[in-house]
Image (spheres, helix red, strand yellow):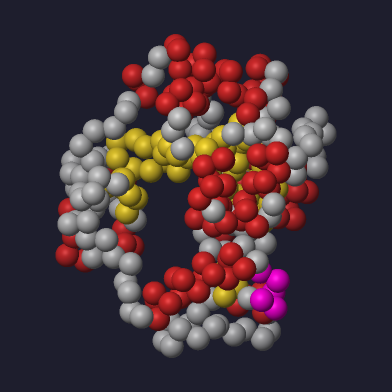
Amino acid sequence: MERAGLPQLMIDTFCHYYTQLSAGESGFIGDAEAQPVAALPKFTDLTAQDEVAGRAALDHVVYLKLNGGLGTSMGMQGPKSLLTAKDRLSFLDVIVEQVLHLRATYDVRLPLILMNSFSTERATLTALDEHESFTQELPLSFLQHKEPKVRKADLWPAEWPADPAKEWCPPGHGDLYAALVTSGLLRRLLNEGYTYAFVSNSDNLGATLDLRILGYLNRHNVPFLMEVAERTAADRKGGHLAQRPDGQLILREIAQCPEEDLASFQDINRYRYFNTNNLWVHLPTLQQIL
């Protein structure tokens, strides 16, 4: 990882989890640790006052899109965001139009920044070049890190001499926070007066920036917010929100659930909320933590 030029923060993070894996830790979170969430603040309870506060804070928001995924499951080798969504427009085209609309409507900066992977960076930036009216001073993208694949049998690094790039994989969306730091982007955003990041998946066109939520964050000094929705039968196998015995909210994915708890995991009446992966992050707080 050092030879590949990866930053120390990423190396330390990988070593932390590799040590746990080597020690036989499963990462499972059982029902005793993941208890149902009784109640949450509701979007319908937000007020006109929240909307006014959100409008005042909008010029201090950055629009972050997670764009590291490929569209291989849909029959293409490039970034998933370049798939056609509607009327010959790709997901990325629609995202750009959404941002341009917000800029024009509210007369704000609202930069759009994509967290790309080493597999999506070039094609995505080429596609953005086609939007001549879309400009900004901040970078259009930053790269998530990569980490070595390990063999299941002995946990040694995977080797593929014919194509060494296949020896690496992206670490997933959770790499967002470390990548913001190591890229220098977090520091630049703070220096230029940005306070909140609205984060969502690039293939989720329903992830729109709502002024009432932003105003709620700003009025109540909320450092982090996850937009969740009630689960349906179609969401049985997706990750759900839960609560530890100490009251801390957590997200549990099905891969983290022990086999004996799978039935309750899929009980949508017990675990009622799923993560939309629309996240709001208070950037000064993130800087303090990292």
Q: Nearer the viewer, residue 47 or 75?
A: 47
Q: Is residue 96 visible from the viewing direction of this image? A: no
Horizontal placement of 285 versus 28: left or right?
A: right
In the image, the segment drawn in magenta is: 2-6
- Magenta segment: does it hold 278? no
* Image-quadrant location for residue 199: top right
- Residue 91 percent across, percent down from the top left: 61, 40
Q: Nearer the viewer, residue 169 or 4?
A: 4
- Residue 218 percent across, percent down from the top left: 49, 26
Label count reads 0
* Image-quadrant location for residue 50: top left
User: Which residue shows up at 32% across the image and 54% down it?
Assistant: 252
User: Which residue shows up at 54% across the image and 83% down it?
Assistant: 157
Horizontal placement of 32 versus 187: left or right?
A: left
229 w.r.t. 268: above or below:
above
Horizontal placement of 37 versus 90: left or right?
A: left
Residue found at the far right of this picture: 132
- Residue 143 percent across, percent down from the top left: 67, 56
Horizontal placement of 19 versus 28: left or right?
A: right
Residue found at the far top of this picture: 48
In the rendered image, which quarter contains the N terminus?
bottom right
49 w.r.t. 109: above or below:
above
- Residue 97 percent across, percent down from the top left: 67, 29
User: Which residue shows up at 20% across the image and 45% down it?
Assistant: 36
From the image, give the main secondary structure of the stretch colored magenta: loop
106 w.r.t. 222: above or below:
above
Q: Is residue 31 visible from the viewing direction of this image? A: yes
Residue found at the far front of this picture: 288
